[in-house]
Image (cartoon, grey):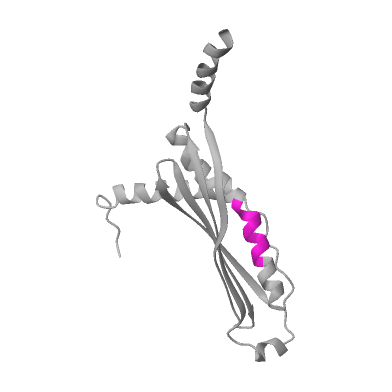
Amino acid sequence: MTEQSSAPQESTEQSKEPGFRIQRIYLKDLSLEQPNAPQILLVASEPQVQVEIDIAVAPLSDGIFEVALSSTVTAKVDTKVLFLVEAKQAGIFEFSNIPVEQIDPMLGIACPTILYPYLRSNIADIISRAGFQPIHLNEINFHGMYEHRLMQAQQAAAAKDGAPTESKPH
């Protein structure tokens, strides 16, 4: 008898526990361009590689978010583009019973950390399939990136609040 009466309590307690769930991880977009091929393929110079990373978050419904990690990898020989890869790795993440103030850091740190290995793999794969040595992106400190974005937002807000009262000579 006591087992039956404690079972509903357990399920109620479990439903109030914080929950984080990955619903899906998927490759949202991937493109490769070689605008100066085939002539540039004959140049024997070492390419210069530039990597850009960005994070976008979109709410889908209550407690469900899409997080998309985008990267642009550009390899140039001299001033000409050898190849350009644009990739967007995304995931759908569900949050339940997590305090609102904890969701933003999770969206900006935990979710990109989960997505990044998939993005790195897809970029290395497409570059090698294009006939080049794969480029393995360096590890990223998403916590540091998140803190930097917070600091920029705070500085922008402070500048906006202070801008009308300040006058700077030209």
x and y, in percent, of residue 131 in the image: 72, 78
Magenta segment's dominant SS is helix
Whether residue 56 sits left or right of residue 30 in the image: it is left
x and y, in percent, of residue 45 in the image: 72, 83
Q: Residue furthest bottom?
A: 39
x and y, in percent, of residue 78 in the image: 64, 83
x and y, in percent, of residue 141 in the image: 62, 49
Identify which residue, 137 or 94, lies in the foreground: 94
Q: Is residue 26 above or below residue 101?
A: below
Q: Residue furthest left?
A: 164
Q: Is residue 44 above or below residue 128?
A: below
Instruction: Tell me which residue sits at (64%, 66%) in the image.
Output: 123
Q: Is residue 151 magenta?
A: no
Q: Residue furthest front?
A: 1
Whether residue 162 sits left or right of residue 41 in the image: it is left
Q: Is residue 118 magenta?
A: yes
Q: Is residue 15 above or below residue 80?
A: above
Quadrant of the frame with the C terminus: bottom left
Quadrant of the frame with the N terminus: top right
Residue 82: quarter of image: bottom right
| Image label count | 0
Region rendered in magenta: 115-123
